[in-house]
Structures are given as structure tokens and as C-alpha cells.
Image: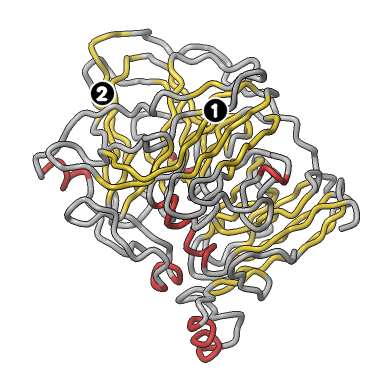
């Protein structure tokens, strides 16, 4: 499924360029309900994605850093952010997973006009849910996110769980040339029709760290955010035993990940609790094992000589629920949503090879209920009365996975392939495997026209997006 060679950890170490780098995100901004707006300035620049002796990589970034500064706000507070556009093209900012008012959602030509080069826009909204979220552009997303425009948004609980450290990892991959520049080819038909734009260099918080120093007995809350255009991560923590406590910012009953591997698709977030169980001086690896025969070591947790504690702390790891409206499954209206298209699938809506070639000439590769969305999309494919419960019965009839994201709402994942899910987890982006069926349930309680799309950004650009209207007279 990869489209370019991947520089794995073993090859990187063999190159003589191994190093120990910090995984910390640039110092962030803390919002207050009475403070001045936080400024996020999008601009071109450079970043040290690779270690010395390699040079800098030209990127696009917020406030001079990749990722952009971590924004931290308390649940229930008002967030005010002034977006400044110093890019050579239009942009916006979307607050991924945050249930904003529609006008603050950051989708050009749908919820706002794009911010022109040299322009500004004030985003202002109350933050309802605690959890791990992120921000990124929703204009020319494949190119802008692929150049480094993103950052974490952490909404702190009123009563957070007790841990020794709270860490955020923004995972990304980059398609770099031998000279260390970001390769061109954004919008290529090959990427659009297959698995999206896969990179050949993986970073954590904009760096290629080799190790992270920890203490034996230390408890860490690890917030994972997948900012990649298309790469799915499957993290194997080996001798460590991660416990999932939240998905897409929403609390879930604490549990071990299936098969011990934490799978996180593009745009998704997973919060883990990790107890460092190695002996002083021991290095415990984390590996990405998602793609067959393309496994590599992400980094080592290196235990220093300090013994913080000899037993696992008995602190609670259960997060308080967020104020989400519970869908009434007994009265919910069911809607079928069919995803078609792409290469090696069932063709373009069953029209056969000739239909596929005709659509490809127009740049249409993917379909939702028979429609490939190109350019600004305003006509909704679903109209839902405000306050009503709904089930989207989704079917992936393609040969590729799709992380499906619904703006302005969180939903319960209630069934996969007609089998009830164990945790009925709340999410805003759900991974669908090839040929898989997934049922999600939600209350249409946030009025407006909302984007609904695949978050493999090349799939979105090639047609896999639509609009769901929520309103009193939908």
C-alpha cells in the first residue's frame, strides 16, 4: 500500500545519523476567558525535520514551528484565536473534533470565506468537551497539511487523572527528496486513486527522535495525534502494556488495545496510560507494525538509573464523560451511506472500466452515495431535523481504508459488520477497513451545514466528501 520507499529506523541508524532528540512540542499558549486572542500565524519557513548533519527543510508552519504551538484551554472556557495568513495562498483553520458553532468550523465556501493572503480571521467559541484535539487548514488541505500546517489543541478536564507526565505526540510522515525538500506531486492521480500521499520519513512532533528518557515506575498519559495525510499507524509498545482511556478526545472505558496494537488512522487521536515497567537502564522499543513487511522502530523508552516507584500506582484512570447528547436508537432514522471508487475496487459506482476512465479524466475518483464532490460543496446529501437521532449505516465498497470524519458532532460507533461494538465508543473520525460496514449513531444537535469526508486528504480532494445539513427545517 506504500507508494514510496520508507527509511526505516534500522536504515537510519546504519547511516550514522542516529541521535537523541526531544519529543516536546513548542511552548504553547494557554487561553483564558478574558485574555487577548491567541495569534496563529501561518507562513513559509524552515524546520529541522532531520537531524544534523542534514540541513533544514522548507515547510509551512504556524508561529515558526512544526507542529504549531500547543494550545491549552480548560473545559468550558472561551477560546479566541486570530488567524493571520502570511502564506502565498488562501487558508483557514479547522478545529478538528471540537463542536464549534458552524461559523467557526473553518471550511471555506461552506462556513466562512477563505482567509486571503495577508488577511486575518477571528475564531471565537466556547469549548464544550475536554480531551485531545488538533487544528489544521481546510483549504487545499493535502498540500497545506502536507507542508506542516497543524498543531495540538488540548482541552484540560476540571478533574484530570493523576499521572507523572502528560505528553503529546503528533505523528506525521513526509515525502522528502534526497536533498531534504518536500517532494512535489500533491494532487497526483496515483495518490488520489490508491492509499493517498504516503511519506518516506516519519516524525514525532516534527523530529526524528531515537529515544525518550523515562523513569522506572513512571506513569505517563500519552496523547497520540495522527497528522499524516494518509499513513495509518499501528503502534506496538512491546513489553509495555498501554491502556486506552480516550478516543478522538472522548473518554472510553479503560481497556487494552486489540491484539496489543494501537491503531490510529489519519486525523484520529488516542489517549493512553503507560506505566514504565522496564528496569533502570533498560530500553523498551515502540514499533509501527501496521503495514506488512514495512515495520520499523519508532523510538525507545530508555529507563534512566532512577527508580521512581517499584509498583504500579493505584490511581484511577477513568475519565469523566463529556456532555454529549445520547442518541435514541429506538427512534433513530437510519440512512445508508455507500463509499465507492478508487483503484482495485468495484469501479466507479459499478459503471465499469469505461465509466471509470471517463470519471478519472475529470479527476473524480471517489463517491459518496454516487456523487463525487469537486470544489466547493454546498448542496447536502442528507438533511436532518435538529434534535433528532440518526444512524448512518456506512459501507466501504472500495479496496482501501477510509477514516471518515463528521464535522460539528461526535457519534457512537455502535456496530461493525452488523456486530455490536464492545465499547460503543464516541468518535468524530472512524476507520473503515476495505469492504467493511460500520454503523454510527448521533443526535443532530449542532445546526448548520457540516462537512462529512474521508480524512485521507487526497481522497477528499478527489471526491470523497459531502455535506450534512442540520436545521430546524432540514
Per the image, the residue denoted by label 1 is 38
- The correct choice, above or below, for 447 with respect to 80 in the image is below
Expressed as whole percent of the image width and height from the top left, the position of residue 95 reads 59, 41
Whether the residues at callouts 2 and 1 have beta carbons within 8 Å, the answer is no
Q: Does 178 sit left or right of 462 as displayed?
A: left
Residue density around tag 2, few if under 14, some if 14–19, many if 20 or more, within 10 Å: many
Per the image, the residue denoted by label 2 is 302
Residue density around tag 1, few if under 14, some if 14–19, many if 20 or more, within 10 Å: some
Q: Nearer the viewer, residue 95 or 232?
A: 95
- Marks 2/1: CA distance? 36 Å
Expressed as whole percent of the image width and height from the top left, the position of residue 204 reads 35, 37
Q: Does 22 sit left or right of 54 as displayed?
A: right
| Mark 2 or 1, nearer chain start | 1
Q: Quadrant of the C terminus?
A: bottom right
Residue reaching furthest to the bottom: 354
Residue reaching furthest to the front: 118
| Residue at 73% from the left image edge and 41% from the top image edge | 101
- The correct choice, above or below, for 324 with respect to 172 in the image is above
| Residue at 66% from the left image edge and 18% from the top image edge | 34
| Residue at 46% from the left image edge and 55% from the top image edge | 89
Amino acid at each position: 500500500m506504500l507508494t514510496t520507499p520508507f527509511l526505516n529506523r534500522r536504515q537510519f541508524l546504519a547511516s550514522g545519523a542516529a541521535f537523541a532528540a526531544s519529543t516536546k512540542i513548542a511552548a504553547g499558549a494557554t487561553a483564558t476567558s478574558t485574555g487577548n486572542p491567541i495569534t496563529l500565524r501561518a507562513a513559509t519557513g524552515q524546520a529541522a525535520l532531520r537531524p544534523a548533519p542534514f540541513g533544514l527543510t522548507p515547510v509551512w508552519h504556524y508561529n515558526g514551528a512544526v507542529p504549531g504551538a500547543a494550545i491549552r484551554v480548560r473545559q468550558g472556557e472561551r477560546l479566541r484565536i486570530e488567524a493571520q495568513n502570511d502564506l502565498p495562498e488562501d487558508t483557514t483553520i479547522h478545529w478538528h473534533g471540537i463542536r464549534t458553532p458552524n461559523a467557526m468550523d473553518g471550511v471555506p465556501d461552506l462556513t466562512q470565506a477563505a482567509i486571503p493572503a495577508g488577511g486575518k480571521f477571528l475564531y471565537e467559541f466556547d469549548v464544550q468537551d475536554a480531551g485531545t484535539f488538533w487544528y489544521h487548514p481546510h483549504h487545499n488541505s493535502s498540500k497545506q497539511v502536507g507542508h506542516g500546517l497543524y498543531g495540538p489543541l488540548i482541552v484540560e478536564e476540571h478533574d484530570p487523572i493523576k499521572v507523572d507526565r502528560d505528553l503529546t505526540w503528533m505523528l506525521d510522515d513526509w515525502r522528502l527528496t534526497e536533498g531534504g525538500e518536500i517532494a512535489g506531486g500533491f494532487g497526483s492521480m496515483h495518490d488520489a486513486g490508491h492509499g493517498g500521499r504516503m511519506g518516506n520519513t516519519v516524525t514525532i512532533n516534527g523530529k526524528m527522535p531515537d529515544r525518550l528518557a523515562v523513569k522506572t515506575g513512571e506513569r505517563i498519559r500519552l496523547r497520540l495525534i495522527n497528522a499524516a495525510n494518509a499513513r495509518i499507524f499501528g503502534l506496538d509498545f512491546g513489553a509495555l502494556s498501554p491502556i486506552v482511556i480516550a478516543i478522538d478526545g472522548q473518554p472510553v472505558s479503560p481497556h487494552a488495545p486489540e491484539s496489543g496494537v494501537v491503531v490510529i488512522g489519519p486525523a484520529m487521536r488516542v489517549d493512553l496510560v503507560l506505566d514504565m515497567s522496564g528496569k533502570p537502564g533498560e530500553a523498551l522499543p515502540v514499533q509501527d507494525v501496521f503495514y506488512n513487511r514495512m515495520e520499523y522502530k519508532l523510538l525507545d523508552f530508555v529507563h534512566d538509573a532512577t527508580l521512581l516507584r517499584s509498583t504500579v500506582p493505584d490511581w484511577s484512570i477513568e475519565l469523566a464523560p463529556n456532555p454529549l447528547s445520547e442518541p435514541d436508537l429506538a427512534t433513530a432514522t437510519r440512512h445508508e451511506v455507500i463509499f465507492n471508487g478508487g483503484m482495485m475496487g468495484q469501479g466507479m459506482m459499478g459503471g465499469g472500466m469505461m465509466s471509470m476512465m471517463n470519471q478519472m479524466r475529470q479527476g473524480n475518483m471517489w463517491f459518496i452515495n454516487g456523487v463525487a464532490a469537486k470544489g466547493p460543496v454546498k448542496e447536502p446529501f442528507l438533511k436532518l431535523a435538529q434534535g433528532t437521532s440518526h444512524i448512518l449505516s456506512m459501507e466501504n465498497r472500495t479496496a482501501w481504508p477510509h477514516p471518515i470524519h463528521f464535522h460539528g458532532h461526535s457519534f457512537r460507533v455502535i456496530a461493525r459488520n452488523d456486530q455490536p461494538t464492545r465499547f460503543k465508543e464516541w468518535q468524530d473520525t472512524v476507520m473503515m477497513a476495505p469492504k467493511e460496514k460500520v454503523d454510527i449513531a448521533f443526535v443532530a444537535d449542532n445546526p448548520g451545514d457540516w462537512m462529512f469526508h474521508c480524512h485521507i486528504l487526497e481522497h477528499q480532494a478527489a471526491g470523497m466528501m459531502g455535506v450534512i445539513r442540520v436545521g430546524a427545517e432540514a
